[in-house]
């Protein structure tokens, strides 16, 4: 599959925009998946309120949320705010689907770059990003609450000329 082709959601699952009514379910996943640095519940509500600059999605399996992600786009830059997949659903292409969805949306919105930060001790996520054209551009020492460094990664979407 080339980088330009959309990456569909795996069969049987549904992707749709995240709603305020999803926040409780998403937050339970957040606490389980990011024990050291979960966002407060209010942060999700605040993000969903910023309708001009944010796009959040959930993936559902028979009504149960199994993944979510969020994109910020304040031109000319865009940022992956979060991406998370239920451990029972990992390795089925959902992370790839959501990352491609954010890349495609950032391109459509006219962003020049897509940025993200990832824990240094998360090689799986880093590998996913590298395979989709992200490069490490910076390290934030001790950025996370437990002292782990953040790696800032960038995917160039448009270049001048
Ligand atoms: C990182 C994460 C989003 C990936 O989601 P996913 O649905 O498992 O991703 P995919 O199924 O699309 O697989 C992505 C790649 O990982 C590979 N992979 C699958 N299982 C793996 C495993 N156990 N270990 C390492 N790589 C694995 C896949 O082969 C795939 O490789 P490819 O791009 O060459 O095809 C998911 O693991 C997750 O939510 N982790 C916890 C939260 C997190 O770390 N979020 C990122 C914060 S920056």
Image (tube, grey):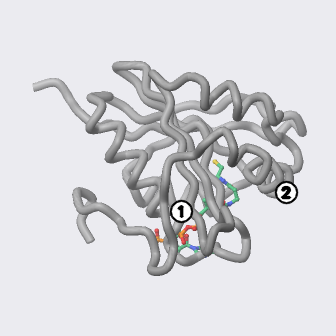
The image quarter containing residue 91 is bottom right
Disc 2 packing (10 Å; few <14; some 14–19; many ≥20): few
Q: Nearer the viewer, residue 147 or 19?
A: 19
Disc 1 packing (10 Å; few <14; some 14–19; many ≥20): many
Name the secondary structure under disc 1.
helix
Q: Residue furthest left?
A: 161
Ligand 1 found in image quarter: bottom right
Q: Position of residue 2 (x, y in %)?
A: 24, 65
Please give the name of the residue rendered at 42% of the width and 46% of the height, measured from the top-left corner.
Answer: 102
Residue 95 - label: 1
Q: In whole angstroms, how far apart are the C-alphas of marks 1 and 2?
A: 17 Å
The image quarter containing residue 149 is top right
Total labels drawn: 2
The answer to whether residue 4 is left or right of residue 84 is left
The answer to whether residue 127 is left or right of residue 87 is left
The residue that mark 2 highlights is 32
Please give the name of the residue rendered at 65% of the width and 55% of the height, measured from the top-left corner.
Answer: 84
Q: Quick check: is the Cβ at mark 1 less than 8 Å away from ligand 1?
A: yes
Q: Position of residue 50 (x, y in %)?
A: 56, 22
Q: Quick check: is the Cβ at mark 2 less than 8 Å away from ligand 1?
A: no
Q: Is residue 75 above or below residue 7?
A: above
Which corner quadrant holds the N terminus? bottom left
């Amino acid at each position: 599959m080339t980088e330009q082709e959309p990456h569909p959601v795996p069969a049987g699952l549904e992707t749709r925009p995240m709603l305020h009514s999803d926040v409780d379910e998403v937050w339970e996943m957040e606490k389980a998946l990011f024990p050291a640095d979960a966002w407060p519940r209010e942060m999700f509500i605040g993000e969903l309120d910023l309708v001009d600059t944010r796009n959040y999605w959930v993936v559902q399996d028979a009504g149960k949320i199994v993944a979510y992600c969020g994109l910020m786009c304040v031109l000319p830059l865009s940022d992956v705010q979060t991406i998370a997949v239920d451990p029972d659903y990992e390795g089925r292409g959902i992370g790839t689907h959501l990352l491609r969805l954010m890349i495609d949306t950032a391109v459509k919105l006219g962003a020049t770059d897509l940025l993200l930060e990832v824990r240094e001790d998360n090689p799986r996520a880093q590998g996913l990003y590298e395979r989709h054209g992200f490069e490490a551009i910076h390290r934030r020492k001790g950025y996370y609450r437990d002292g782990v460094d953040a790696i800032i990664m960038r995917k160039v979407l448009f270049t001048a000329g």
